[in-house]
Amino acid sequence: MKPVRFLSPVALAVALAPLAALEITLPAETDRLIESKLPGYTLATTYCYTCHSTDYVRVQPPGMNRAAWRASVVKMQKTFGAQIPDDAIDPIAEYLARTYGAERAAARK
């Protein structure tokens, strides 16, 4: 059986130093949520952009109903610690359902 050799902490630090110096610059976000007069639009731009790009909203299943959007917003608040006030959850869910989800077609009629 061959002995296992480990790098010393100094050798490991020297080997990984070039990785620490790596800097990545992302392009500016230019996409925006679809504008709406619904109160949830302003709330979504205030609270959702803190963590998400618009792409994240757009890749959600288009058939998500209001309850599913609400569950998603609550998950962001309760599980991931998003600073979304309780009274903002329903308006955000309504905006997302009517603009991106199952209520989208009905809202455009």
Image (cartoon, rainbow, N blue to C red):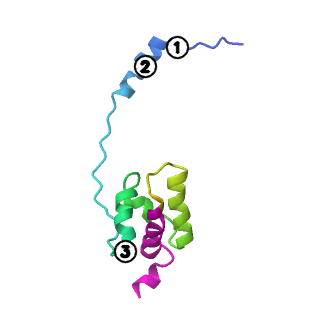
Numbered badge on residue 38? 3
Compare marks 2 and 1 and give the one earlier in the sequence: 1
Q: Secondary structure at mark 3?
A: loop
Identify which amino acid the numbered label 2 is placed on: Ala
Disc 1 residue crowd, few under 14, some 14–19, many 20+, Cα 10 Å: few
Residue span colored magenta: 87-109
Given this view, does label 3 or label 2 mark the residue nearer the observer? Answer: 3
Q: Secondary structure at mark 2?
A: helix
Q: Secondary structure at mark 1?
A: loop
Position of 41 relative to 80 (above/below)? below
Measure how far apart labels 2 and 1 are at the Cα level.
9 Å
Compare marks 3 and 2 and give the one earlier in the sequence: 2
Is there a contact, CB below 8 Å, between mark 2 and mark 1?
A: yes
Disc 2 residue crowd, few under 14, some 14–19, many 20+, Cα 10 Å: few
Tell me what residue is drawn at x 38 percent, y 61 percent: 54
Residue placed most toward the observer, 52 or 30: 52
Residue placed most toward the observer, 24 or 82: 82
Residue corresponding to mark 1: 7
Where does the N terminus fall, quadrant-wise? top right
Residue placed most toward the observer, 12 or 68: 68
Residue corresponding to mark 2: 15
Measure how far apart labels 3 and 2 are at the Cα level.
54 Å
Identify which amino acid the numbered label 3 is placed on: Leu
Where residue 93 sits in the image (x, y, percent)? 47, 68
